[in-house]
Image (cartoon, grey):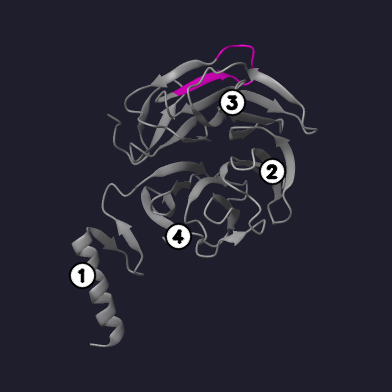
Amino acid sequence: MNFRQRLWNCLTCCCLLSGTVLNGTGTALADEPTLQYPIDVAAAADGTVYIADLKLPGIWKYAEGKLSVHHQASRQFRTPLNAVRCVVVNAEGVLFAGDSSTREVYRLEAADKPVPLTGGKIGVASDLAIRGDQVLVSDLETQRIWSIPQAGGEPVELALLAGVRGLVVTPEQELIVVTTNADQVRMISSDGQQKILAAGRPFEFPHQAALVAGQLYVTDNYAQAIWKMPVAGGEAPQKFLGAAPLNKPVGICAKGETLLVADPHAKDVLVVSVDGKIQSLFGAAAE
């Protein structure tokens, strides 16, 4: 038995004792349920779903009914995607991810080679959005919204906004922002002017938002809810879904005419229809 085979047997033994499964390349995969702390979700045009998992740490891919590790990050702090917090996919299917451990946004054209875009100039990326050839970033640390070329480059400040979290780009390329501070939903024009769409504090602790059929849906971690309001504003947000099977919803994105919701405490990604039906992305009915 050569050294490589002895090493493989040792790894296999240790993983079996710890309840971990190895795939054929030696990548560690958790037992079912595989998700550990899904914090955000993004859907590509071809139907592929990417899931940022803070405790994997790394990014899962769900395609053709199968869940696999797309990128396994190191558990060592200050290494790429050790603390991945948000993901987004552009029109060409290229994945981008924000990471607070390295203060960076990465492009992942190759799953095993995340490319840094800014040289560590982003603090805590809370959400990402695509507008044209730019990646928009909400930065909790600097309390700003940044614009970064998808190819990489110097971040440009779009707006200063305390508590900034969710970002949504409308079909008209307008930017909608969700904040934990007062006047919690705003529209920001290209010249930085802000228009209030939801005044006051209708949400308890909003995280992200998604747009489907002219309606804006906002996850609320503290309220264990998803809220709904017209993207044009003028109406107070209404609670769309609350309590079970939602636990602590955080990440949300549109996938066609449905919503995908990442719930780290439920350890699941939920598929939500606009009429309120909800089930696990992985096929089981949500309880």
- Quarter holding the C terminus is top left
Q: How far apart are marks 2 and 1 (CA)?
A: 46 Å
Residue 97: image x %, image y %? 55, 50
Bounds of the magenta segment: 226-236
Question: Which disc is residue 73 wearing?
Answer: 4
> Residue beneath label 1, please?
13
Q: Which residue is drawn at 24% across and 75% down?
A: 10
The amino acid type of the residue labelled 3 equals Asn
The crowd level at tag 3 (other Cα within 10 Å; few <14, some 14-19, many 20+) is: some
Does 234 lie within the magenta span?
yes
Residue 27: image x %, image y %? 36, 65
Whether residue 233 sits left or right of residue 40 in the image: it is right
- Quarter holding the N terminus is bottom left
Residue 16: image x %, image y %? 20, 63
**Label 2 or label 4, whichever comes before in sequence order:** 4
The amino acid type of the residue labelled 4 equals Ala
Q: Is residue 252 above or below residue 200?
A: below
